Amino acid sequence: MELVRLERDIFLPEKALGHWYVDKKWFAYSLEDTVRPEGEYVYQKTAIPEGDYELIMSYSNRFKLMMPLIINRQGITPILYHGDDISNLGIRIHGGNDSQDTEGCPLMGANRNSVKVWNCRNINQTFRTELAKSLKKNKVYLEIRNLNPSV
């Protein structure tokens, strides 16, 4: 694993749904908070901006295990919310079912419909395991893209 891509393709008033790809192969479904215009932010109800990031593994106090953390790619614009760099403050990839579970983090699930994702536990465990293995050999990057050009 060297490149993870999150493609958002469904944009609803309170959520965005999409697909996770690992090294160009489909991996899972995504669900996030609303994608808002640049500069518009609602605390814990806004998807992280489209862009290029790096993934690391770090211990999550909330989940009590090592988990993927989305950080800035060196030399690229930081993850800004209200003008503050929140790159290292807990934007994690994790499981959950609906937009109330995201708190700004992208969710990963094995199944989805137009309102939620589910069967999250195993797909997230597989992702964590593979990411940890890959990080022993090389850096892993995350690309986030909006497939709707109006967003």
Image (cartoon, rainbow, N blue to C red):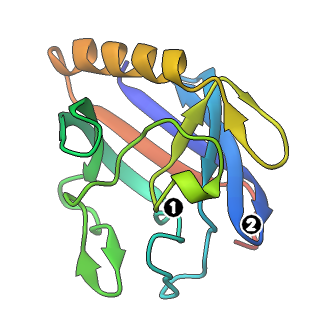
**Neighbour tally class for label 1: few under 14, some 14-19, many 20 plus, Cα within 10 Å:** some
Residue type of the residue flagged with mark 1: Glu
Residue 149's label in the rendered image is: 2
Contact flag, marks 1 and 2 (Cβ < 8 Å): no
- Residue 38 location (% of width, % of height): 52, 82
Please report the residue visible at 17 percent of the width from the left and 14 percent of the height from the top: 137
- Placement of 102 over or under 126, stated as above or below: below
Question: Which residue lies most toward the right here?
Answer: 114
Where residue 15 sits, quadrant-wise, is: bottom right
Res 6 → quadrant? top right
Q: Nearer the viewer, residue 105 or 148?
A: 105
SS class of the residue under badge 1?
loop
Q: Position of residue 48 (x, y in %)?
A: 46, 63
Vertical side of 151 occupied by 32: above or below: above
Tell me: 116 left or right of 84. right
Can you tell which quarter of the image residue 43 is in?
bottom left
Say the numbered circle drawn on residue 106: none
Q: Residue at x 62, y 69 (%)?
A: 35
Dot label at residue 50: 1
User: 3 above or below 102?
Assistant: above
Q: Quadrant of the N terminus?
A: top left
The residue type indicated by label 2 comes to Pro
Q: Looking at the image, which residue is at 34% across and 50% down?
A: 53
Residue 27 location, x and y as percent?
Answer: 59, 21
13 in relation to 33, above or below: below
Where is residue 7 shown, x and y percent of the image?
63, 45
**Number of other residues with Cα within 10 Å of mark 2, as a class: few under 14, some 14 to 19, many 20 or more:** few
